[in-house]
Image (cartoon, coloured by chain):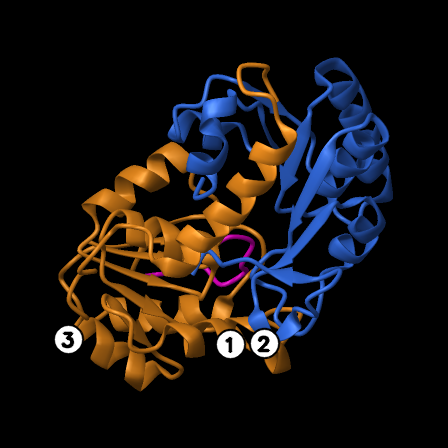
Chain colours: A orange, B blue
Amino acid sequence: MILLTVGTQMPFDRLVEIVDQIAAGFDEPFIAQIGRGAYIPRHMEWKGLIEPVEFEQLMEEARLVVSHAGIGTIVTAQRHAKPLVLFPRLASLNEHRNDHQLATTAALSGRSGIAIATTKEMLRACIDAPPAAFAVTNMHDRQRQLCETVSRFVAMHCVRGKAL
Amino acid sequence: MLLRPAIDEYEPLFVTTIEGLAKRDHIARVQLLPDSNRDQPLAALRCLIAAFWLIRAHRPQVLVTTGALPGLFCLFWARLFGARTIWVDSIANFDGPSLSGRFAKPFANLWLTQWEHLADGKSIQFGGAVL
C-alpha cells in the first residue's frame, strides 16, 4: 500500500490529483489523507482527516509514503523507517504562506530514505523506483542538539520530582 | 515528541489541541485546549481563557511550547504566573519568526529558531532542529 498525505491543515489539490492519476495505473492500493482539499480522488481510498492512532497504523503498513514536505509527516515516516517521497508546496500557487517547504526539501535532499519530486514525471519515477528505507531511525545531530538545548534550560529552572 | 527525553524525568504535563495525539503516544498526563488561530477571534478568545484556567490550576515551573496560538496563550499566562518559558519556533518559519513567535518574544526566557540563518545570537537563538 502507498500512503499519500497532505497533512491536516491546508488543502493541496495539485498533489492529490497528480497522485490520483498515477494511482490509476497501479494495482497496488493507494490510501490518501487529503485534508481540506476539494479534489475528490477517483483511484484512491481517501479521507479528509485520519485520526492519529489510525494514521500511525497506516504508516506502519505502507510500503512507501508520498507527502507534502510537512514536518509532522517527515518525523513520523522517519520513526517508522519508511521510504518517503516529498513534494513541496509552493507559495506562488497559494499552497502555503511561504516557501519553507522548498527550504525543507533543499535541506533534506540527499538524506537516506528521502526522495524529492516537484513534477508529476519526477513523482512517478520516484514511485516506480522508491528510495531505500531510512538507514537509521535514531535522532540525528540537530535533533539531539535541540533536545539538549531544552534539557539544559529545564534543568536550570525545574526542581526534579516536583511536577512541571 | 522529539523533546520528550529532555523533559520526561520531570513528569511533564502535556497540553494539546488534538486528543488522539496523546493516545497515539501513550501519554496519560494530558490536558486539552480548544484549537484556535488568528482567523477565528471567538475561538481564540475561548482558547485564551481556557489556557488561563489551565495554567492557573497547574502552575508550571517551566513551560516549553512549539506554538502556535494556543501555545502562545499558555506561554503568556505561564510567564505571568512565574514560570520560565521556552518558545521553539516551528521549522515552518524559514523567512522569519512566526506571528505567534513575535508576540511570544517579550514573554519567552529562551526563544529558539530552527533555522541557523535566522539566529541573531541574542534574542533569537539556534539550538538545533527537528530535521
Say what amino acid the circle numbered 1 marks. Answer: Ala
Say if the magenta span includes residue B115.
no
Q: What residue is at 23 percent from the left and 68 percent from the top?
A: A112
B69 left or right, relative to A58: right
> Please, is residue B100 above or below residue B61 in the view?
below
Question: Which one is nearer the viewer's eye here, A17 or B125?
Answer: B125
Figure quadrant of residue A118 = bottom left
Residue B63 position, x and y percent, is 67, 34
Badge 1 local density, few (<14 within 10 Å), some, or many (20+)?
A: some
The picture places residue A128, in percent across and down from the top left corner, at 16, 75
Distance, label 3 to label 1, CA atoms, is 24 Å
Up-down relation of residue B72 to residue A30 (above or below): above
* Tag 2 residue: A99
**Residue in the foreground of this view, choosing between B47 and A152:** A152
SS for callout 3: loop
The kind of residue on which mark 2 rests is Asp
Q: Between disc 3 and disc 1, whose residue precedes?
A: 1
Read off the residue under disc 1. Answer: A103
